[in-house]
Image: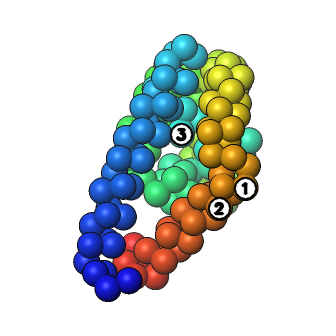
Amino acid sequence: MSDEPAVLSDVALTTFRLSSQVLALAEDLARPAGLTAAWWQVLGAVHETPDTVSGVARAMGLTRQSVQRIADLLVGRGLARWEDNPAHRRAKLLVPERAGVDAVRRIAPQHAAAARALVAELGPDRAAEVLAALHDLSAALAVVHPD
């Protein structure tokens, strides 16, 4: 490609647009369960395995401060709790409460329907290619601009 700066600009603009679209869909999916997209994201990160705020932040590509704020809200609303971490005395584990698990489960049918619709729109092979390309793009950006 001859115009590399234009490639980065197009990647950035397309990614910003895609991010907005995914977040809008996530908000629509989470709302009926009484969650926001951000709450769902953090609850989803600890749904199967409790983790620390720092661990969730690393896994999701978020700041530790933003995850801490959301985790504190989740705990305050009875959707999660703090437990001692046997691996680290000061870094508590965020664990979903039954209400948090139930809220995430309530999202699952609509999430599955949206996923089926997206795959139907793209076709299964193209959907796999797009996902692989997004992973490749993320890996390339991590090399070009490490955190």
* Of callouts 3 and 1, the N-terminal one: 3
Q: Is residue 32 left or right of residue 10?
A: right
The residue that disc 1 covers is: 125
Residue 28 in picture, x, y percent from top left = 48, 23
User: Residue at point 54% right, 14% down?
Assistant: 32
Residue 48 in picture, x, y percent from top left = 74, 41
Above or below, comparing residue 46 to residue 30 in the picture:
below
User: Residue at point 47% right, 40% down?
Assistant: 22
Above or below, comparing residue 119 to residue 130 in the picture:
above
Around disc 1, counting alpha carbons within 10 Å, would you say few (fewer than 14), some (14 to 19), or many (20 or more)?
few
Residue 87 in picture, x, y percent from top left = 67, 60
Q: Nearer the viewer, residue 93 or 108?
A: 108
Around disc 3, counting alpha carbons within 10 Å, would you say few (fewer than 14), some (14 to 19), or many (20 or more)?
many
| Residue 141 quadrant | bottom left
Around disc 2, counting alpha carbons within 10 Å, would you say few (fewer than 14), some (14 to 19), or many (20 or more)?
few
Above or below, comparing residue 10 to residue 66 in the picture:
below
Q: CA distance from mark 2 to mark 1?
A: 6 Å
The residue that disc 3 covers is: 42
